[in-house]
Image (tube, rainbow, N blue to C red):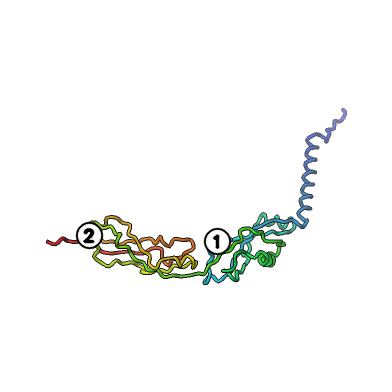
Amino acid sequence: MPSVTTPNNTPSFQLSKFLLCVGAAAVFWLLNALNKPGYTLNVEYPIHFVYNDSLYIPTSSLPRTVTVNVSSDGWGLLRHAWQPFQDEPVDYVVRNPLQASIINTSSLTIALAEHIKRLRVNHVVADTLDLQFDRRMTKTIRLAVDSTRIDLVSPYVISSVINVTPRTIEVTGPAQLVRGLPDTAWIRIPRKRIVANYDEELPLNQFRHPLLHSSATKADVSFEIGELLSPQ
């Protein structure tokens, strides 16, 4: 009986062989491309601003990161794409906060080049680099209750001293804002038709501002009331 041979050049075999060749070529091309230098990428790098915070305060939010244009081979940028920067922030010294209006990109680029060793720093992308500072100022403000607006049910009257704790607070912030604060902050009693002794903790909403820090955010207010009797 004559032997029967099965041909190896079936369509499915040829397609698999072609795909393997294409895959091998693609891997070879990718590895070769990643070894080449000269790739550039914009990355976000953390930044820490150094200034005398006992004398000055920023009046606008300081950026947490800056955009940096860097160069490397493909492997270096690929590693960063998979694992972003975990390094300590680069320090940027603000030497004259009241005169500084923008970040000096030249000096920041030099600082970044010394800080980032594994990538070449080309330049800092100049976007959102404005700086605004003011002198830090603290003011002592007296707290007092606006007794003319306490709503008592007749014939009750306030029969004791109105106690406020604390009596004064310290408010710290930019000088331009703090100078405009009053010497006395008047506290209003929100309760209506009071018929018994009063003792409550009230919020100091006058000083709720993102740039202001108050030594207290609430005040305890208490006083006694008595019934005013008509003469017989």
Q: Nearer the viewer, residue 175 or 24?
A: 175
Which quadrant is the N terminus positioned in?
top right
Which quadrant is the C terminus positioned in?
bottom left
Residue 160 percent location from the top left of the image: 25, 66
User: Residue 122's quadrant in the figure?
Assistant: bottom right
29 over 71 or under it: above or below: above
Q: Amino acid at mark 1?
A: Ser
Q: Residue furthest top?
A: 1
Q: Amino acid at mark 2?
A: Tyr
Q: Earlier in the sequence, mark 2 or mark 1?
A: 1
Query: Is residue 112 rendered to the left or right of residue 182?
Result: right
Which label was assigned to residue 156? 2
Residue 181 percent location from the top left of the image: 43, 65
* Proximity of marks 2 and 1: CB atoms separated by less than 8 Å: no
Q: Which residue is mark 1?
A: 61
- At numbered mark 1, what does the secondary structure look like: helix, strand or loop? loop
